[in-house]
Image: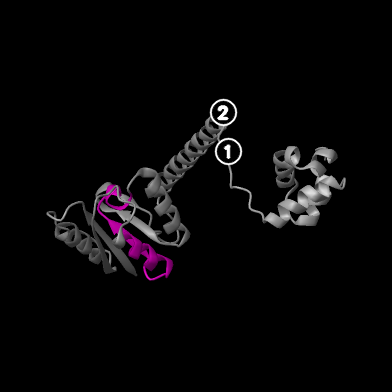
Amino acid sequence: MKAAVYVRVSTPDQTVEGQEAELVAYCRARGWETVIFRDVITGASATRPGLAALMEAARRREIAAVVCVKIDRLGRSLPHFAVLLHELQTLGVGLVCKDQGIDTVQEAGRLNPAAHFFITILAAVAEFERELIRERTIAGLAAARARGAKIGRPVKMTPEQRGAILRQRGEGRSVRAIARAVGLAPSTVWLVLRAGAGATPGAAQGGLAA
């Protein structure tokens, strides 16, 4: 079994040797081969070359476990750590945070009860964080609409499509029929008609009834 040893310090004046020696000795005591991944970067950074390389090795099924000293060496926040743990679980890769007694490496095909409890709590934390983000997003969109901001992608159409919409409306065709003819959503056709009806005699004569 091969384990990925992950070590990280925040600044160049710190060294990873102490963490590395401790974790390599731990892995050897459990009979695991080791491959080392290192980062010298603040834990808050979203981009960590060593961690990225480690996760790629996990996705290639080159390692069976990840070993670090503590949670904060690996994840930049508890939700981020929960996401990492979930992916490792999905890939069948165990995780050991040595100094905190966290060990999700399955023994005889089973997780120990403490590891199972820990994973359940982290999953709840991650779900709670997702709900908070969703609620903040919804509240932000509602506030933006209240200020009169336009939400969503701008409508993309050619001048020919816009002209065809106004022309066909002037001929008395329905919004849905025009939408099918020009290959746009009825809501987009409605927006064009609402914006252009006053400036186009044909469209004005046709009205805006769907």
Q: Residue furthest right?
A: 172
Q: Position of residue 26 (x, y in %)?
A: 23, 61
Count of picture labels: 2
Quarter of the image for residue 65 reads bottom left
**Mark 2: few/some/many CA within 10 Å (<14, 14-19, 20+):** few
Rendered image coloring scheme:
one colour
Secondary element at tag 1: loop
Quarter of the image for residue 88 reads bottom left
Tell me which amino acid carries mark 1: Lys
Tell me which amino acid carries mark 2: Ala
Name the residue rendered at 44%, 62% in the picture. 92
Examine the rendered structure and indicate whether residue 58 appears above or below residue 103. Answer: below
Examine the rendered structure and indicate whether residue 33 appears above or below residue 108. Answer: below
What stretch of residues is rendered in magenta? 51-75
Is residue 4 rendered to the left or right of residue 134? left
Q: Position of residue 52 (x, y in %)?
A: 35, 61
> Label 2, label 1: how many angstroms apart (C-alpha)?
10 Å
The tag on residue 86 is: none
Was residue 191 drawn as part of the magenta stretch in this picture? no
**Mark 1: few/some/many CA within 10 Å (<14, 14-19, 20+):** few
Residue toward you, 133 or 117: 133
Name the residue rendered at 82%, 46% in the picture. 169
Q: Which residue is mark 1?
A: 150
Q: Which residue is mark 2?
A: 146
Secondary element at tag 2: helix
Residue toward you, 160 or 209: 160
